[in-house]
Image (spheres, grey):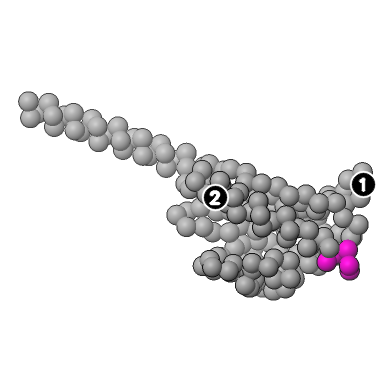
Amino acid sequence: MRKKLAKLGLVVVGVLGAVAAAGAVVGATTSVRVMEVKRGTTASTEQIWELWADVPNRTRLDEGLEYARLNGPFREGTTGEVKLEGQPARRFLITRCEPVEGYTDRFFLPLGGEMDWRHTIRETKGGLEVAFEVEVSGPTALILAPVMKGILREELPPTVDKLVSLAEEG
């Protein structure tokens, strides 16, 4: 009887190990779109770009932002740090940077999570459109996505509105 229980125990441990390994692989490759905010604007692409590239002054756009720092020029590969009120500072990396078209910055979250912010300026029939798209990935993506959506639903639209307003004031 002991041998059968021992074998059963090994089988259970093996199955649980396989399930955990599969979960880790799926979690590591999971990417979840959190939200996108788009706004039309009469500002020029250069006016929008200037505000995006002026990282230390992003506190003008986002009231909850204590500071934003960039460790070099605003271009692909440059790192930085932001601090939101009541949150720990977060490192980021500019993963894509195409002047006056758009850029992506990646924020590094706890437990291997990453959050990508895609910022784009697009031509539309009615003029220009500014878009912010947020996506989380990594092992905690399925947990973080709804949490981030709840936070950003309130925070992101006014920030995009402020960007557009400041750019249009020129």
Give the residue at mark 1: 126
Amino acid type of the residue tagged 2 in the rendering: Val
Position above or below: 4 against 95: above
Amino acid type of the residue tagged 1 in the rendering: Gly
Indicate the position of residue 61 as horizontal and vertical percent values: 73, 66
Residue located 62% across and 44% down the image: 33
Asked which secondary structure carries label 1, the reply is: loop
Query: What stretch of residues is rendered in magenta?
Result: 166-170
Where, quadrant-wise, is the C terminus in this rendering? bottom right
**Residue found at the far left of this picture:** 1
Q: Is residue 105 left or right of residue 31?
A: right
Indicate the position of residue 112 as horizontal and vertical percent values: 47, 54
* Residue 109 shows in this picture: yes
Q: Is residue 49 left or right of residue 18?
A: right
Asked which secondary structure carries label 2, the reply is: helix
Give how far apart the Cα atoms at labels 2 and 1 are: 34 Å
How many numbered marks are there?
2
Secondary structure that dominates the magenta span:
helix
Which badge, 2 or 1, is on the more N-terminal residue?
Answer: 1
Does the magenta-highlighted stretch encompass residue 169?
A: yes
Crowd band around label 1 with a 10 angstrom C-alpha radius: few (<14), some (14–19), many (20+): few
* Residue 98 shows in this picture: no
Give the residue at mark 2: 147
Depth order, front residue of 84/9: 84
Q: Is residue 21 left or right of residue 134?
A: left
Q: Pointer 2 and pointer 1: residues touching (CB < 8 Å)?
A: no
Residue located 66% across and 46% down the image: 35
Does the magenta-highlighted stretch encompass residue 35?
A: no
Residue located 85% across and 51% down the image: 40
